[in-house]
């Protein structure tokens, strides 16, 4: 489970940074912007079969 927790922590940190940079609440971070940054950072967001 530790790898899952590490990925969740990284995702939360990226969302927090985007919120701080844009001076908005973390709940208002645009999902597409978050996904784009996660992909830039090398996260796998979906699995193709």
Image (tube, grey):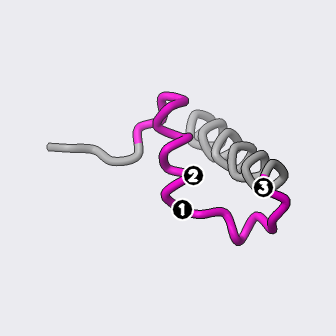
From which residue to which does the magenta span run?
22-44
What residue is at 80 percent from the left and 48 percent from the top?
Answer: 21
Place residue 25 in its image quadrant. Answer: bottom right
Place residue 27 in its image quadrant. Answer: bottom right
Q: Secondary structure at mark 2?
A: helix
Q: CA distance from mark 3 to mark 1?
A: 14 Å
Query: Would residue 35 be counted in the magenta stretch?
Result: yes
Q: What is the x, y in percent for residue 41?
A: 55, 30
Using the image, determine if residue 34 lies above or below residue 30. Answer: above
Residue denoted by label 1: 31
Q: Tell me, yes or no, whether the two marked residues, 2 and 1, touch with CB atoms within 8 Å.
A: yes
Query: Would residue 6 be counted in the magenta stretch?
Result: no
What residue is at 49 percent from the left and 57 percent from the top?
Answer: 32
Q: Secondary structure at mark 1?
A: helix
Using the image, determine if residue 37 lies above or below residue 25. Answer: above
Closer to the chain start, of discs 2 and 3, is: 3
What residue is at 28 percent from the left and 44 percent from the top?
Answer: 47
What residue is at 70 percent from the left and 70 percent from the top?
Answer: 28
Asked if residue 36 lies left or right of residue 46, the reply is right
Q: Residues within 10 Å of mark 3 (few under 14, many from 20)?
A: few
Q: CA distance from mark 2 to mark 3?
A: 12 Å
Residue denoted by label 2: 34
Q: Which quadrant of the rendered structure holds the C terminus?
A: top left
Asked if residue 15 lies left or right of residue 24, the reply is left
- The front one of 1 and 6 is 6
Mark nearest the camera among 2 and 3 is: 3
Residue denoted by label 3: 22
Asked if residue 39 lies left or right of residue 18, the reply is left
């Amino acid at each position: 489970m530790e790898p899952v927790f590490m990925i969740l922590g990284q995702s939360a940190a990226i969302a927090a940074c985007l919120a701080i940079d844009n001076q908005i609440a973390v709940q208002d971070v645009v999902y597409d912007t978050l996904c784009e940054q996660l992909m830039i950072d090398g996260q796998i967001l979906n699995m193709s079969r």
